[in-house]
């Protein structure tokens, strides 16, 4: 099941974090897209640990 809840929030947070760290905009957007896509793989907050490095 794909759950897109919060994907926009994750994208914006990751994009902001990457640009604040000095990452160029294109790379930051790619990183943010991957983070948002990863967010779709879990349902709810019970499985957040699966995304931890």
Image (cartoon, rainbow, N blue to C red):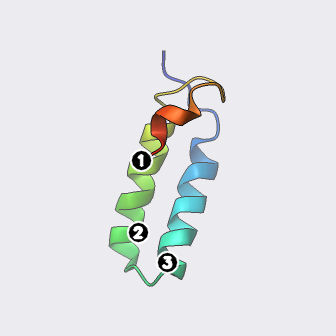
Q: Are marks 3 and 2 in contact (CB under 8 Å)?
A: yes
Please tell me in which quadrant of the rendered image residue 12 appears.
Answer: bottom right
Q: Which residue is mark 2?
A: 28
Coordinates of residue 2 in the picture (x, y in percent): 49, 22
Earlier-in-chain disc, 2 versus 1? 2
Q: Which residue is mark 3?
A: 19
- Farthest residue, direction bottom: 22
Position above or below: 27 against 37: below
Relative placement, left or right, of 14 versus 30 is right
Identify the residue shown where x is 47% and y is 72%. Answer: 18
Relative placement, left or right, of 23 versus 19 is left
Q: Which residue is mark 1?
A: 53
Identify the residue shown where x is 64% and y is 40%. Answer: 6
Q: Nearer the viewer, residue 34 or 46?
A: 46
Identify the residue shown where x is 52% and y is 27%. Answer: 42
Q: Secondary structure at mark 2?
A: helix
Earlier-in-chain disc, 3 versus 2? 3
Between the C-alphas of marks 3 and 2, the distance is 6 Å
Q: How many numbered marks have been drawn onto this rendered protein structure?
A: 3
Coordinates of residue 5 in the picture (x, y in percent): 63, 33
Q: Secondary structure at mark 3?
A: helix
Q: Nearer the viewer, mark 3 or mark 1?
A: 1
């Amino acid at each position: 099941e794909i759950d897109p809840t919060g994907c926009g929030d994750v994208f914006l947070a990751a994009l902001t974090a990457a640009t604040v760290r000095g990452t160029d905009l294109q790379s930051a957007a790619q990183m943010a897209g991957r983070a948002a896509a990863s967010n779709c793989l879990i349902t709810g907050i019970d499985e957040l640990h699966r995304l931890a490095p």
